[in-house]
Image (tube, rainbow, N blue to C red):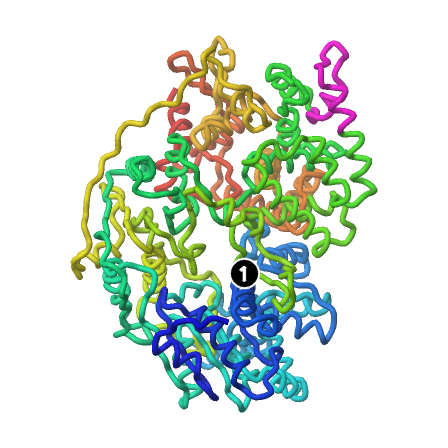
């Protein structure tokens, strides 16, 4: 074992003896080396200490695996037997000793709530048009409660005290004493308690509850706690700044009276408040262990002096929320080049010049590989222009944590699964059927497919029926192969688990079609495998499609890149690190990223370093983001740790900015935009005000991009996948009509999305009305009868008559969710009765209902229908547009294209 050179503070941290140790380790100061060396030091110097008695905790499976690997390489196999684990893995295994349980990540918890929507009996936190609208807020609230060790009983008691206090102050204005607010809080309290009850009854563990339930288990089981304290005589914690109250209390209990707890972290890199990380982990440690030893690692081995000067100036503005406001990083590295600020007129110029700069650096020999460059951004959608610019120049790039759900290969695969699973011909899957038929294997042409779509609309059939029943003369070459394909896989789908025949399906579809598609394809395949092993009962395709629908509705993504922080995995104390559930990270290896520009969010870049860093899109409202308060907040009275000070959102965003700056080894560029609509980030303004000497602002200009060489025959290569073929078909002009007719709703669709208009109204792909639109159709149809009931209402039975009208018009199908259907029925009756009573009181005289009109202009005929015109007392005429959603304000109505056109039609 060769000696490792350590500086004096590192050596002191490694050789610290007994008792609590707080290591404040700045960016690039070698904190992982210190942890590994301390493990070896303890094993070599503490008499009779066994490797299994050392516990090292962190937040990511990859970090735990890396620590174990480095310890084994440095100190041999005995060091590899130490317990390296994430917090969640450790607690999951601890709780598993008390009984079997299944882990739920945030998306799975959302799905669990969605499936139990009826039992939740939501009122305030239910949106009829979007039944799952507020479930993410409820999940996040429950997680914050667990982070702060707040139980449902404790929260309920708080609400009861608040209600009693408000009652005692009746008549006197008091913050938080609004009756509606108390009712909302009680609903949250009830749902939180029910969620915990249902999960416990079904043996489920959310990520948040793993930690709090482990703490509760240790509090309730003194003998178990004693055994664990005896087993783990030394505890080390990495990334301590990201711990929350529950995790800190777990550490306190495990360390016991020995207090051999060594924590390492950097308060300037605390960037996970949205996951419940406490803003004051270091303060809590110092208060709980006043006898602790504090060691500061401030010598940076990564960045140049000029980069550190700018980074230090940036984080200095966070003086209110820093554990050590005077902390500064020093380095023996070279001064390095100036830190540049690129300022552009718009996002196109920013993207084009950045791509040009990267390409020229490579071509001129300034860099040896494209992978020396990393472009870091605040949010995934910020990279879109840059991706286009890199592609145009043929520059290879790799996107970390890329969500593959919307990539063409995955959309083709999901569409095929939906068509196979749609043996009953659900009209909702016509879009999937169109995508599958666009696959080149089936040799379907756009003209025939468009004709089938139009026939389905005019004959009021579903698209599958039209294709299945088409006459022999309409056969296309691939028809029999397509029908046989569906027959075989539908037979498998009814009897066999999806995971068993999924490889057969992908092989028959020829997936993946290229090396470029392989990572995304592998990620989705692993997603299916994990679902089959951990998240289903029957494993049939029908169950997967329901799960995947909810998964996407909840905002779930199947990501490439690093696993999510806090992802659950087995403790790393064996040769192979196993993961129970994590974002896909093995699909793209480090080797696969070599030679490619690295694109990622700043959060994904945490813990990484790059030769050259470009911090991208430093624009107000983009970085820093606009603060959005949680819809359901944990009351300050229930926080177990110190409350944040100052503008904590901006301070956390500034810490994230600091993380971005300190990823750079040799060069750093800060890229921004300045125009009347976009202004540079306040972080750049503050740097300008402080005036660090190594900041150079320029206004680069990009050169024109050389267009790609056209094929010799003038034809582009044939599209190989369904998505690309559909794009080609859409780009082809549709034969014009003699007179172009456009309805008001079609005009609205076109203004919203031209592509949506093209498929819906030119291709006429048949899709069923979504529940909100179906509800509107029902109410529209009922209103004509309701007006007649208003005129004849002499016996006081108006509401009963309206109920009969609504029941008669209510369809047997169309609302897939029973809770949503019940809420819509209640809302429909309320709206119809309200409108009828209002018109009855006003004494209106009906003039027209569903009055058609047309407006001709320049070869275009605009058609529409006014819902109702009636005369009101005083001689005026009122135009009524039936709306079942939120009423428009007068300002919105004044700007409405629809209302404007109706007014013009009335004047004709």
Give the magenta part as a residue range: 461-485
x and y, in percent, of residue 280 in the image:
40, 75
Q: Is residue 618 left or right of residue 509?
A: left
Q: Is residue 791 visible?
A: no
Mark 1 lies on a secondary structure that is helix
x and y, in percent, of residue 19 in the image:
47, 88
Residue at 73%, 34% (x, y): give it.
Answer: 420
Return the residue nearer the eye: 444 or 228. 228
Residue tagged by mark 1? Answer: 62
Membership of 288 in magenta stretch: no
Q: Is residue 554 visible?
A: yes
x and y, in percent, of residue 492 in the image:
81, 38
Tell me: residue 699, above or below residue 263: above
Return the residue nearer the eye: 13 or 805. 13
Membership of 466 in magenta stretch: yes
Quarter of the image holding residue 223?
bottom right
């Amino acid at each position: 074992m060769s000696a490792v050179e350590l500086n004096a503070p590192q050596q002191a941290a490694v050789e610290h003896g007994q008792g609590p140790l707080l290591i404040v380790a700045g960016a690039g100061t070698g904190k992982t080396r210190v942890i590994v060396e301390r493990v070896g030091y303890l094993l070599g110097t503490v008499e009779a200490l066994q490797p299994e008695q050392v516990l090292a905790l962190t937040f990511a499976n990859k970090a735990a695996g890396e620590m174990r690997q480095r310890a084994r390489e440095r100190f041999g196999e005995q060091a590899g037997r130490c317990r390296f684990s994430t917090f969640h893995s450790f607690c999951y295994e601890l709780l598993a000793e008390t009984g079997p349980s299944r882990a739920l990540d945030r998306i799975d918890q959302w799905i669990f709530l969605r499936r139990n929507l009826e039992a939740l009996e939501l009122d305030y936190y239910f949106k009829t048009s979007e039944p799952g609208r507020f479930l993410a807020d409820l999940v996040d609230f429950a997680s914050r409660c667990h982070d702060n060790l707040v139980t449902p009983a404790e929260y309920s008691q708080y609400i009861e005290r608040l209600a009693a206090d408000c009652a005692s102050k009746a008549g006197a204005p008091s913050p938080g004493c609004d009756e509606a607010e108390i009712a909302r809080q009680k609903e949250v309290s009830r749902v939180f308690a029910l969620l915990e009850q249902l999960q416990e009854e079904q043996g489920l563990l959310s990520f948040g509850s793993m930690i709090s339930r482990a703490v509760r288990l240790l509090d309730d089981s003194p003998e178990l706690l004693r055994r664990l304290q005896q087993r783990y005589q030394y505890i080390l914690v990495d990334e301590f700044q990201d711990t929350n109250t529950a995790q800190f209390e777990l550490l306190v209990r495990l360390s016991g009276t020995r207090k051999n707890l060594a924590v390492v972290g950097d308060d300037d890199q605390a960037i996970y408040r949205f996951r419940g990380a406490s803003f004051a982990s270091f303060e809590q440690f110092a208060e709980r262990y006043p006898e602790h030893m504090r060691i500061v690692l401030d010598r940076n081995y990564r960045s140049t002096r000029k980069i550190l000067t700018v980074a230090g100036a940036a984080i200095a503005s966070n003086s209110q929320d820093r554990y050590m406001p005077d902390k500064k990083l020093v380095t023996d590295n070279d001064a390095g080049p100036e830190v540049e600020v690129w300022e552009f007129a718009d996002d196109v110029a920013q993207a084009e010049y950045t791509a040009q700069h990267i390409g020229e650096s490579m071509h001129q020999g300034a860099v040896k590989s494209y992978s020396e460059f990393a472009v870091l951004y605040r949010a995934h959608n910020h990279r879109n222009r840059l991706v286009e610019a890199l592609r145009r120049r043929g520059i290879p790039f790799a996107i970390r944590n890329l969500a593959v759900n919307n990539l063409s290969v995955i959309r083709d695969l999901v569409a095929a699964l939906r068509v196979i699973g749609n043996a009953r011909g659900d009209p909702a899957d016509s879009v999937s059927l169109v995508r599958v038929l666009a696959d080149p294997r089936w040799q379907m042409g756009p003209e025939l497919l468009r004709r089938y779509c139009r026939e389905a609309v005019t004959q009021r059939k579903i698209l599958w029926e039209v294709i299945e029943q088409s006459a022999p003369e309409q056969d296309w070459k691939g028809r029999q192969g397509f029908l046989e394909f569906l027959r075989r896989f539908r037979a498998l789908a009814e009897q066999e688990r999806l995971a068993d025949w999924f490889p057969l399906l992908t092989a028959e579809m020829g997936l993946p079609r290229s090396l470029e598609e392989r990572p995304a394809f592998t990620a989705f395949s692993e997603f299916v495998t994990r679902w089959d092993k951990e998240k289903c009962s029957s494993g049939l395709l029908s169950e997967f499609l329901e799960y995947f629908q909810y998964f996407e509705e909840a905002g779930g993504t199947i990501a490439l890149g690093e696993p999510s922080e806090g992802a659950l995995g087995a403790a790393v104390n064996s040769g192979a690190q196993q993961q129970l559930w994590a974002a896909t990270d093995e699909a793209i290896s480090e080797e696969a990223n070599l030679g490619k520009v690295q694109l990622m969010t700043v959060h994904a870049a945490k813990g990484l370093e790059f030769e050259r860093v470009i911090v991208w899109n430093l624009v107000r409202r983009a970085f820093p983001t606009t603060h959005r308060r949680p819809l359901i907040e944990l009351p300050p009275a229930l926080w177990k740790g110190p409350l944040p000070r100052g503008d904590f959102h901006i301070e956390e965003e500034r810490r994230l900015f600091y993380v971005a700056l300190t990823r750079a080894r040799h060069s750093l560029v800060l890229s921004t935009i300045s125009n009347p609509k976009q202004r540079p980030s306040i972080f750049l303004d503050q740097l300008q005000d402080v005036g660090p000497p190594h900041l150079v602002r320029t206004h680069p200009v990009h050169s024109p991009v050389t267009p790609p060489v056209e094929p010799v025959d003038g034809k582009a290569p044939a599209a190989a996948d369904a998505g690309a073929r559909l794009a080609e078909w859409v780009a082809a002009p549709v034969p014009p009509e003699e007179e172009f007719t456009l309805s008001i709703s079609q005009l609205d669709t076109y203004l919203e999305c031209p592509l949506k208009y093209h498929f819906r109204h030119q291709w006429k792909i048949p899709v069923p009305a979504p529940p909100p639109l179906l509800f509107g159709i029902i109410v529209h149809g009922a209103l004509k009868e309701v007006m007649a009931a208003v005129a004849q209402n002499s016996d006081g039975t108006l509401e009963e008559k309206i109920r009969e009208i609504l029941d008669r018009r209510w369809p047997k199908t169309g609302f897939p969710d029973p809770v949503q259907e019940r809420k819509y029925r209640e809302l429909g009756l309320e709206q119809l009765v309200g409108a009828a009573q209002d018109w009855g009181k006003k004494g209106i005289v009906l003039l027209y209902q569903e009055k058609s009109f047309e407006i001709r202009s320049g070869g275009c005929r605009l058609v529409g229908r006014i819902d109702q015109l009636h005369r009101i007392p005083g001689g005026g005429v009122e135009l009524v547009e039936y709306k079942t959603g939120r009423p428009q304000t007068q300002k919105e109505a004044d700007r409405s294209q629809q209302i404007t056109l109706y007014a013009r039609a009335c004047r004709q």
